[in-house]
Image (spheres, helix red, strand yellow):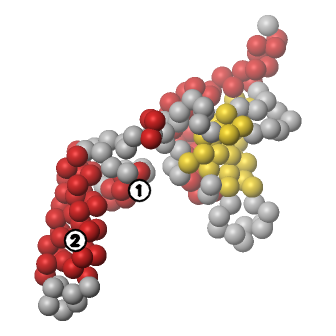
């Protein structure tokens, strides 16, 4: 019985992020939900480098609730951390959101609307600059299609999804 209680109170690595600011952003959601956490930053440069990785640790009894809140998968695709504490699967990623089996994530209605508008605007802008800067025409047309087509399909690569989520005010 006491071993079961110890497992619930032991810290478990919830997610590992490539950048500290992503982990701080995710930990804000945990704080708002009242889930205690610990942020472990791997910063050998004492704050000089911008690209420092970070790991979020939570209690064993809060793991499932925290994964649901941050929309993390079950950790089967992540790597394992080994420390003196209990090791657990870790999800590595940009925002920590899981994309099921490599499929593109779905776009919300607002993201689709903005993507279609932004894509059409880029294509139209490319047609307007044909006489002044001819090299911009293919660049703007391709950029517009890369945003508009996923918006019409309702699914987009993660980079496009994150861009549209950020432009609509949502969390990427």
Residue neighbourhood size for the residue with mark 1, other residues' Cα within 10 Å, grouped as few (<14), some (14–19), many (≥20)? few
Query: Which residue of the protein is positioned furthest toward the right in this rendering?
Result: 84
Identified at 18% across, 92% down, the residue is: 132
Q: CA distance from mark 2 to mark 1?
A: 18 Å
Residue 10 x %, y %: 76, 27
Identified at 62% across, 50% down, the residue is: 17
| Left or right of 71 in this view: 44 | right
Seen in the picture, residue 4 relative to 98 is either above or below; the reply is above
Label 2: which residue? 141
Identified at 64% across, 67% down, the residue is: 50
Disc 1 element: helix
Mark 2 touches mark 1? (CB < 8 Å): no
Label 2 or label 1, whichever comes before in sequence order: 2
Identified at 82% across, 11% down, the residue is: 2
- Quarter of the image holding residue 137? bottom left
Query: Which residue of the protein is positioned furthest toward the bottom in this rendering?
Result: 132
| Left or right of 144 in this view: 35 | right
Disc 2 element: helix
- Quarter of the image holding residue 81? top right
Residue neighbourhood size for the residue with mark 2, other residues' Cα within 10 Å, grouped as few (<14), some (14–19), many (≥20)? some
Which label is found at residue 159?
1
- Quarter of the image holding residue 106? top left
Q: How many marks?
A: 2
Residue 132 visible in image: yes
Q: Quadrant of the N terminus?
A: top right
Query: Which residue of the protein is positioned furthest toward the top in this rendering?
Result: 1
């Amino acid at each position: 019985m006491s071993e079961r209680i110890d497992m619930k109170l032991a810290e478990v690595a919830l997610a590992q992020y490539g950048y500290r600011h992503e982990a701080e952003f995710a930990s804000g959601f945990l704080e708002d939900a009242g889930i205690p956490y610990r942020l472990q930053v791997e910063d050998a440069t004492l704050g000089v480098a911008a690209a420092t990785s970070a790991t979020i640790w939570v209690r064993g009894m809060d793991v499932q609730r925290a994964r649901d809140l941050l929309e993390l998968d079950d950790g089967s695709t992540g790597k394992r951390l080994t420390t003196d504490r209990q090791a657990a699967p870790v999800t590595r990623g940009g925002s920590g959101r899981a994309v099921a089996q490599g499929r593109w994530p779905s776009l919300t209605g607002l993201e689709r609307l903005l993507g279609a508008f932004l894509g059409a605007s880029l294509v139209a802008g490319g047609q307007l600059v044909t006489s002044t800067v001819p090299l911009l025409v293919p660049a703007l047309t391709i950029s517009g299609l890369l945003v508009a087509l996923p918006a019409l399909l309702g699914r987009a690569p993660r980079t496009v999804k994150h861009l549209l989520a950020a432009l609509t005010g949502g969390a990427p």
